[in-house]
Amino acid sequence: MKILVQKFGGTSVADLKKMELCARRVIEAIEKGYRPVVVSSAMAGETDALIELARQAHPRPPERELDALLATGEQKAVALFAMTLNRLGYPAVSLCGWQVPIVTDAVHTKARIKKVGKSKLLKLLEDGYVPVVAGFQGVTEDGEVTTLGRGGSDTTAVALAAALKADCEINTDVPGVFTADPRVVPTARKIPRISYEEMLELASLGAKVMQIRSVEFAAKYGVRIHVRSTFSPEEGTWIVPEEEVMEKLAVRGITMDTGETRFTVVKVPDRPGIAAEIFKALGDAHIVVDMIVQNVSHDGFTDMSFTVSKNDADRAEEIVRKIAQKIGAKEVVRDDRVAKISIVGIGMRSAYGVAGRMFDILARNGVNIKAISTSEIKISCLIDEKYAELAVRALHEEFIEELEELQTD
Ligand code: ADP
Ligand code: ASP
Ligand code: MG
């Protein structure tokens, strides 16, 4: 039995007309000899609307109840999807996370998948049904409903593909993974093949086309992912092991992330243990710190800057203000209007001069760099949010469009 997991995102199932187009994709796969397992997100805007409703009911809704509410978005979508397939003459059965079951840990709103039940799915397939599984949700060992974090239907799909040893098709509103967000850079181009590692960096640095955890999962279990458009038959992007990627480009893609806040602790006494005190307190509060910059010390004082996710910024501010007072720092400055711009590519490992070129392009465009961080295959610069799109376009022109010209001349 050649199983194919087909995931459809929120915009793909936005209304019943679009859902029918998705159902037709499923039928095409059946006609090609596959036995599809469908994963659907909630209809576009539904999850946001439910979150808003929850906030109206309670300013900080209990996470258990938030999960119970958010799971209804996908439950509604899969029931409608299964009805549509049945109407078109293909027997289908919808399943919530608990019915599969997709067993997770108990961390509400960002649960991790621990186990995937496959016997029920296999039985349905053998009996000639198309299982239509609710994305984004699971169940704990104790029977509590959980959700997997925003964009979590991608992870449901990859987990099912891993369990069923199937390929995984991610059907979305763009025709693949692009060299930059096609909505920001109109000249961005589709990447035919990309390694797990590069996709993981792109996803972590702001390319929301795939949820980060889904790519981690795929890399761990070797699931091959095909990201493609729901609404066009063209071949999309394959996310595969590095050995299968022929071209090792220094810059495969460019991302932008406006989801972080920068704090600067001004005039910190420059003595051992101060950084430890600040970052340990943030760590104890489960706040992930991303970029850190410490300026050169003057007269025994230094400035220290760091970024955290905007979601954690209020809590981080409370903690840092308390510590700043205790250690005698002058003040804490908060800046929400920053953007992190990154370039990513496995070829960067063996290329030289890439960072210099990146900084030069930003300088030529009058963009000041507030912080820098690097890894083996990426360079990130923190800049003023208002220059974010300009910077992404300029970097794209220099690193990607230039390269294409060289290759095709
Ligand atoms: P879905 O609802 O199908 O899960 P998402 O909205 O989560 O879709 O992800 C698709 C969106 O990701 C696209 O509409 C696009 O704007 C955005 N995106 C950001 N960066 C990229 C990129 N490098 N390549 C493709 N899409 C990207
Ligand atoms: N519906 C959820 C969200 O909007 C999960 C998903 O779409 O993947 O985040
Ligand atoms: Mg998504």
Image (tube, rainbow, N blue to C red):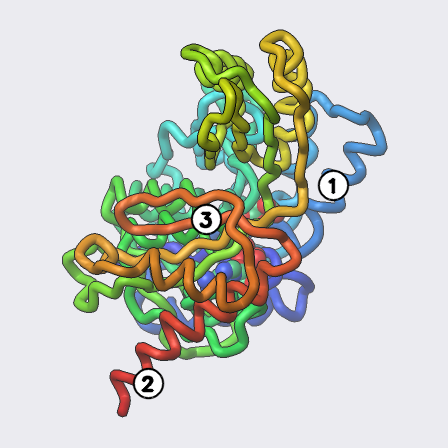
Q: Nearer the viewer, residue 4 or 113?
A: 113
Q: In this rendering, which labeled residue sits more in front, label 1 or label 3?
A: 3
Q: Residues within 10 Å of mark 1 (few under 14, many from 20)?
A: some
Q: Residues within 10 Å of mark 2 (few under 14, many from 20)?
A: few
> Which residue is disc 1 drawn over?
50
Q: Between residues 273 and 308, which one lies in front from this camera angle?
A: 273
- Mark 1 to mark 3 CA distance (whole Å): 26 Å
- Determine whether 250 is above or below 187 in the image: above
Give me the residue at 15% from left, 57% from top: 243
Whichever of callouts 1 and 3 sits on the residue coming sooner in the sequence is 1
Q: Which residue appears at 64% of the width and 30% of the height?
A: 313
Q: Which residue is mark 2?
A: 405
Where residue 265 sits in the image (x, y, percent)? 60, 25
Residue 302 visible in image = yes
38 vs 175, nearest the viewer: 175
Numbered circles on residues, count? 3
**Residue type at numbered disc 1:** Leu
Tell me which numbered mark, 2 or 1, is placed earlier along the sequence.
1
**Residue 58: quarter of image:** top right
